[in-house]
Image (cartoon, rainbow, N blue to C red):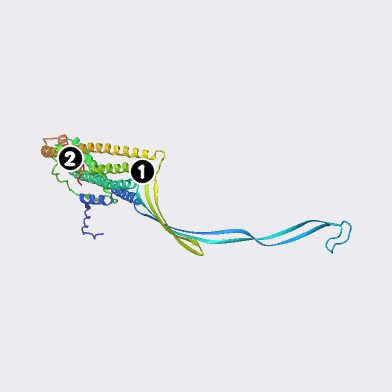
Amino acid sequence: MAEEGTPEAPAPAPRVLTLNQAERTAIAQQPQLLVARAATATAIAQADQARAPLLPQVTATAEYAREGRIYATEQGSRATTTNATANMGGGMNNGTTPVGTTPTAVAPTTQNFGQIISTSTDVWLLELTATQLIYDFGQTYEKSRAANLNVSAMTLTEKTTLLTTLLTVRQAYFNARAMKELVGVAKETLDDQNKHLTQVQGQVTVGTQPQIALAQQLAACANARVALITAENNYEVSKAQLNQAAGIATGTDYDVGNEELAPIEDEDQPLSALAPKALAARPEMASFDKQRESEEATLRSAKGGYGPSFLASAAALEAGTDSGLSPGWSAALILSWPIFQGGLTKGLVRQAEAGLQTVDAQRGLEELQIRLSVDSARLSVHANKATISAANDALTSAREQLRLAEQRFATGVGDIIELNDAQVAYTSAAAQVVQAHFNLASARAQLLAAMGRP
C-alpha cells in the first residue's frame, strides 16, 4: 500500500487489441480454420492412398512350420506248422508216419509284431514378391488424378473459410468498436445530465423552477446511469463475441482500437464491373472448377471398370526343411477381366455422372450468390457513405439545439422538458453517427469478402 499522503500509482491502462492482431490470431488458431486445414490434410492423405496402387507393391513373407508323421513298422514274425494224423491200425512207417494212418492237411500259423514310430521336421519358407500394375484402362490412374484434384479443391475451400473468418472477425471488431464509442456517448450524456441536475437544484432552491423539475431531472440522471451500465455491458459482450470470432481463449480485459477500413478503390463501380472481378477472384468458383475436373476423372475411372487389368508379378523364395533351404523364383503376367459384377460398374458410372451434374448445379447457384453478395455490399457501402454525411449534419444540429436549450434553461426562459428533449435528441444523433460508421466499415468488409479479397 502507498504511504499516507503519497498518491497511489495510476492503474495501468488496459492493453489495446488492434484489428491486425485480431486477424492474425484468427488465422493462427480459429477452430473453423483449423478444421479446414485438417480437411485439406485429409484430402492429401487420400491422394497418397489413391496413388499407391500405381507404384510397385513389394511383400516379404516368412513362414515357419513343424510337420510330423506317425506310422507303424514290422519288426519280425514267427511261424509254426501243426500235422494232424488219424491212427488206422497202429505201427509206424519209417518212424515218421504210423503204418495204416492217413496224413491230414498241414495248418501253418504266423504271428506279426509291429512298432509305432513318430517323426517331425522343421519347414521354412522365405519369399519376396513384387507386383506392378501395367494397365487397367485408366481405373487407378484416373482415381489418383481425381484425388489430386480434390486436394486442389479443398485448398481453395480452405481459402474460402479464411475469407469468411476474416469477415466475421472484422464485423465483430467494428461492432465492439461501435459499442465502445456508445459507452463514450453514454458517459457524455450522464455528465450532461449531472450538470443539468446541478443547475436545476440551484434554480429550484431560488424558486425559478418548480419542484417537479428537480424530480424530472433526477429521473433523467437515473436513466442516464442505466444507459451507461447497459452500454458498458454491451461493450463487454461485443468483446466476448470478438474473442469467439478470432479464436481468442482469454478474457475481455482489453480495449479495441480505433481502426477503420480504408475505402476500396473500386467500391463505386457498377455491378457489371465488379461481378466479373469477383467471379474471377472468389476461391469458391475455382474450387468448383477443380471439383468438376475431379468428377470427370472419377467418371473416366468408373468407365475403366468395363476393361481388363494387366499386372506383372515376380517372386524369389527359399524353402526347405531344417536340413537345408533351396532357392526358387517365379515370374508371371496376369490378365484379369471381370466379366460380370452384378451391375457394379454401371452403377459407379451413373453415380459419377450424377456427381458431375451436382457440381455444375452448385456452381451456377454459387455464381448467383456471389453476384447478390457483391451487389448488396456495394449498395450498402454507397448508402452508408451518404448516411454518415447526413448523420453528422444531424449531430451538429442536435448539439446546437442542446446548447440553446441549456442557455434558455439557465436564463429561466426554457423549462426542464425542453432541456431533456434536447439532450435526448443529441444522444440519439451521436449514437446514429456511431452506428453509421460501424455500418460503413462492416459494408466494406462485406465487399472485400464478396470480391474474394483478404
Looking at the picture, does residue 338 appear above or below residue 99?
above
Seen at 21% across and 36% down, the residue is 372
Horizontal side of residue 184 vs 331, given as left or right: left
Residue at the spot x=27%, y=41% of the render?
292
Callout count: 2
Q: Quadrant of residue 265?
A: top left
Residue 427 is marked as none
Q: Point out the frontmost of discs 1 and 2.
A: 1
Q: Nearer the viewer, residue 352 or 20?
A: 352
Instruction: Give amino acid for label 1.
Output: Gly
Check contact, mark 1 vs mark 2: CB within 8 A: no
C-alpha span from label 1 to label 2: 44 Å
Q: Secondary structure at mark 1?
A: loop
> Eyeballing the image, is 321 above or below 166?
below
Choose the circle earlier in sequence order: 1 or 2: 2
Q: Which residue is mark 1?
A: 307
Please tell me which residue lies in front, 198 or 187.
187
Residue carrying label 2: 276
